[in-house]
Image (cartoon, rainbow, N blue to C red):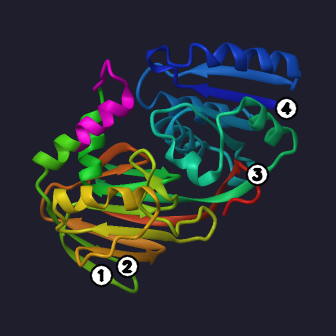
């Protein structure tokens, strides 16, 4: 085997796990194993692109949704045919780990190596965002968010808290609710259209975002379409009142909330409205978001869809 681990050891939070992982690799004698550590934002994109072009068989992100996001974009940017992409894996050690919840992936080193030994992979869909501001194409494995979620992602960049990443996230969510001005957004697919004041929109390949909020309970990683949840002109109180239901994956029955499916959507706004992907801020509308069916092989249990 030729295995590459791309590690986000921000603030040394993997200090206890990494020695165990390295020791396990030595004991297992699985062939060539490399560890690459990220030093800055978007560094994992560069590392993953190089690893894919160098012919690694398994490319494993060690971190959270943001690390996985960069690894996948590195693979998709590589100058090799899609048939030669490495299988992508994840050891979820981030602050949210929302993709791992949908994919049924644990942070067990033993489970990860069992998947590699048996070459247990599934071909999963990815989302593709084509932006105009800046002109860029970005891929995502989990969810693209428009509105408040993008504002929170933008605020989280470069911020930290002595009380930990979860506290930091919820602090910015609360600040966002109190200060965020809803934007007028238009969303168009080939079968439906929505327009109005927007609090949050989730274009979902996976089910969870925002640290275990099940915003799209019907989403599947392999069905070739998005589930889209739109929370329009909703008040802070109504959102918080229904947060418990969202955590349990219960759809919200309010006139300001609607659910849709699509393979592609066009998003426009006359206001400066942001978009994030897998918790990473990517830019401003307008944007086109489309599904890329069975784009990569992912190390994950076979029962997950």
Q: Is residue 295 magenta?
A: no
Residue, disc 1? 193
4 or 2: tag closer to the N-terminus: 4
Residue 170 lies in the magenta stretch: yes
| Mark closer to the chain start, 4 or 1 | 4
| Cα gap from disc 4 to disc 1, whole angstroms | 48 Å
Quarter holding the C terminus is bottom right
- Is residue 133 visible in the rendered image? The answer is no
Q: Which residue is mark 2?
A: 189
Upstream in sequence: badge 4 or badge 3 = 4
Observer-side mark, 4 or 1, equals 1
Spatial separation of the CA atoms under disc 2 and disc 1: 6 Å
Q: Secondary structure at mark 1?
A: strand
The residue range painted magenta reads 159-173
Marks 2 and 1 close (CB-CB < 8 Å): yes
Give neighbour class at mark 4: few <14, some 14-19, many 20+ (Cα, 10 Å): few
Residue 195 or residue 50, whichever sits in front:
195
Q: Between disc 3 and disc 1, whose residue precedes?
A: 3
Q: Main secondary structure of the magenta part?
A: helix
Residue linked to disc 4: 1
Q: Residue at x 14, y 59 (%)?
A: 182
User: Which residue is under mark 3?
Assistant: 121
Percent x, y of residue 116 = 81, 39
Expressed as whole percent of the image width and height from the top left, the position of residue 42 reads: 44, 32
Residue drawn 28% across and 49% down?
Answer: 150
Disc 3 element: strand
Compute the Cα span from label 4 to label 2. 43 Å
């Amino acid at each position: 085997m030729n295995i590459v681990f791309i590690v986000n050891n921000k603030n040394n939070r993997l200090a206890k796990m990494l020695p165990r992982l390295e020791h396990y690799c030595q004991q297992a004698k699985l062939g060539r194993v490399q560890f690459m550590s990220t030093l800055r934002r978007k560094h994992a994109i560069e590392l993953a692109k190089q690893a894919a072009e160098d012919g690694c068989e398994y490319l494993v992100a060690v971190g959270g949704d943001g690390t996985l996001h960069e690894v996948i974009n590195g693979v998709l940017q590589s100058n090799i045919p899609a048939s030669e992409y490495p299988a992508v894996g994840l050891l979820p050690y981030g602050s949210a780990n929302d993709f791992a919840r949908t994919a049924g992936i644990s942070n067990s080193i033993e489970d990860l190596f069992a998947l590699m030994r048996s070459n247990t992979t599934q071909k999963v869909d990815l989302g593709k965002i084509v932006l105009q501001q800046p002109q860029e194409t970005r891929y995502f494995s989990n969810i693209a968010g428009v509105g408040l979620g993008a504002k929170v992602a933008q605020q989280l960049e470069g911020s930290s808290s002595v009380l930990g990443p979860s506290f930091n996230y919820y602090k910015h969510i609360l600040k966002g609710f109190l200060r965020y001005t809803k934007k007028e957004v238009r969303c168009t697919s080939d079968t439906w259209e929505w327009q109005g004041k927007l609090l949050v929109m989730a274009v979902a390949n996976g089910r969870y975002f925002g640290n275990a909020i099940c915003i799209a309970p019907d989403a599947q990683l392999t069905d070739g379409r998005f589930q889209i949840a739109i929370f329009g002109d909703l008040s802070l109180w109504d959102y918080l009142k229904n947060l418990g239901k969202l955590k349990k994956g219960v759809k919200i029955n309010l006139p300001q909330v609607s659910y849709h499916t699509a393979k592609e959507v066009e998003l426009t706004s006359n206001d400066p409205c942001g978009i994030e992907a897998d918790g990473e801020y990517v830019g401003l509308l307008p944007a086109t978001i489309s599904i890329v069916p069975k784009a990569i092989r992912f190390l994950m249990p076979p029962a997950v869809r």
